[in-house]
Amino acid sequence: MRATFRTTSFVLSAALAAPSLLASSHMDAPLITLDDAANTTDVYAFLTADDAGAKYLSTAVSVYPFEDPGIGPNKYNFDDNVRYAIHVALGDDRTSGRPTLSYFFNFDTTFKNEGTILQSYTGIVQDVDDASQNLTQRYRVTKIDRRPGQNRVEVLGTGLLVPPNNQGIVTPEYNTLDGEGVVKGGVDRGQQLDRYTDQTVHDLGDGYSVFAGQRDDAFYADIQAVFDLLNLRDPAKDSQKGFNVHTIALRIPVSDLGGDMQVAGVWATTSRRQIEVRFDNFDPIRKGRFVQVARQGNPLFCEALVAIADKDKYSRTGPHRDQALFAQYATQPELAALLNGTVFDGNPLPNIETNRDDIAGIFIPDLIKVDLSTDAARLAGGGADHATNPDDAGFSRLSVFGGDELWSPLQQAMVPGGWPNGRRFGDDVLDIAVSAVISEPGACPPVIRVAGDNVNSNDVAFSKVMPYAPTPQNGRNHAHD
């Protein structure tokens, strides 16, 4: 199958190319696919503001791909033995790919009653950690500030509660019809949040707030068809539909970052202890320093650009090594050559396979870059025409490719309203990434081409307040594509 082509716009309605390279399947590198609780699926970073005009860098990382809702007796949870982290780079650190500030999240799991098979719930949960919630997770947030004159460790919060997973009838506050119906959608005001979520968005003081818990997988794309040798479907189907992830969301006051006339870089990592020793009839002993086992910044870099030989190396290294180890994958993207050899076979697009400094500018070093000088990002809700939670006016899932731009006082120019200027919940990163690869921004005039897989929305509405990520899927009433 071949797609039609125009010099100013391009729509792939029937096929994309390079199935193993186009989609955020959440299976970035070979080794991390064996460690779900430490496997980062997506990272988000975008600018928000409160009613008083105070600005925040809102960040999030999701882990544990493809959680099928409502399993039992065991449940998907954050791992007490994984150190989860969100990193922020400022100034020269952003250029070099080193963290200026790091926020670490460590979890602890307890049971009220271990003499039962009912691991998570012994009754209907009315409030987080009530007598009916048998399994409870709490966590600590630690901030490390490496700026000159700071260099200090600060515990921002301890004993912070994680809400229960969404089972169905026993977790009715997440769902319609007391759990018999589908999950509730996102909201545009904090007062409308379901009780469990509202009770676990924690105010840490000084403008910080945090949430950690199960949420709907906010990435949407026809992954199955892309990996099925590009036999895309009409209509297309969202392969992440009906699945959950575990998400940590952290809202950081811009004032604590030194003001808004700067660009911040954000990425996330997961780490485990260096040594684990197992004995018969005893719990494992874990010793040594924490060693990084996964990382992620921009969506799609490891999956869509980095070759198999270097994927595990990417997981174990930091952004400060990207220029030396991975820059060639951005400046000469194999994806562009594969697209030319398949979709554009016989009529290849010029100037997209080499010297791609524009692609390197996004991915090297692999941080999500957020211009803090703009107005707050436009956020997704439940769609432009949603009755109670519409998208913000001017929001486009395609970011700059959909005309969604913001004025930057710092750069004295218009910048993308979403990824690659930050990444919002709702950004269609698959379509944006492929559109960027097949466009020619350096041409005079620039040539912009737009591509897509025809999956244009998530299956659950986003919230426009903390934690932004959609409500977790209902174990009793959900559907997969």
Image (cartoon, helix red, strand yellow):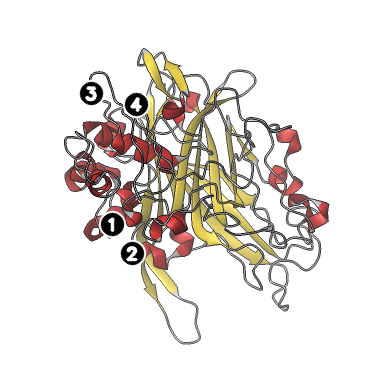
Disc number for residue 30: 2
Is residue 78 shown above or below 349?
A: below
Quadrant occupied by the C terminus:
bottom right
- Read off the residue under disc 1: 311
Image-based side of 352 in relation to 297, left or right = left
Q: Secondary structure at mark 2?
A: loop
* Residue contact between numbered discs 2 and 1, judged by CB atoms under 8 Å: yes
Q: Amino acid at mark 1?
A: Lys
Residue 154 x, y percent position in the rendering: 48, 41
- Please indicate, yes or no, whether residue 307 appears anywhere in the rendered image: yes
Disc number for residue 166: none
Q: Residues within 10 Å of mark 3 (few under 14, many from 20)?
A: few
Q: Amino acid at mark 2?
A: Pro
* Badge nearest the viewer, 2 or 3: 3
Depth check, front residue: 424 or 78: 424
Q: Amino acid at mark 4?
A: Thr
Q: Secondary structure at mark 4?
A: loop
* Residue contact between numbered discs 4 and 3, judged by CB atoms under 8 Å: no
Q: Amino acid at mark 3?
A: Ala
Disc number for residue 8: 4
- Read off the residue under disc 3: 443
* Residue contact between numbered discs 4 and 1, judged by CB atoms under 8 Å: no
Counting residues from the N terminus, which is met first, the one under dot 4 or under dot 3? 4
**Which of the 4 image quarters holds residue 53?**
top right
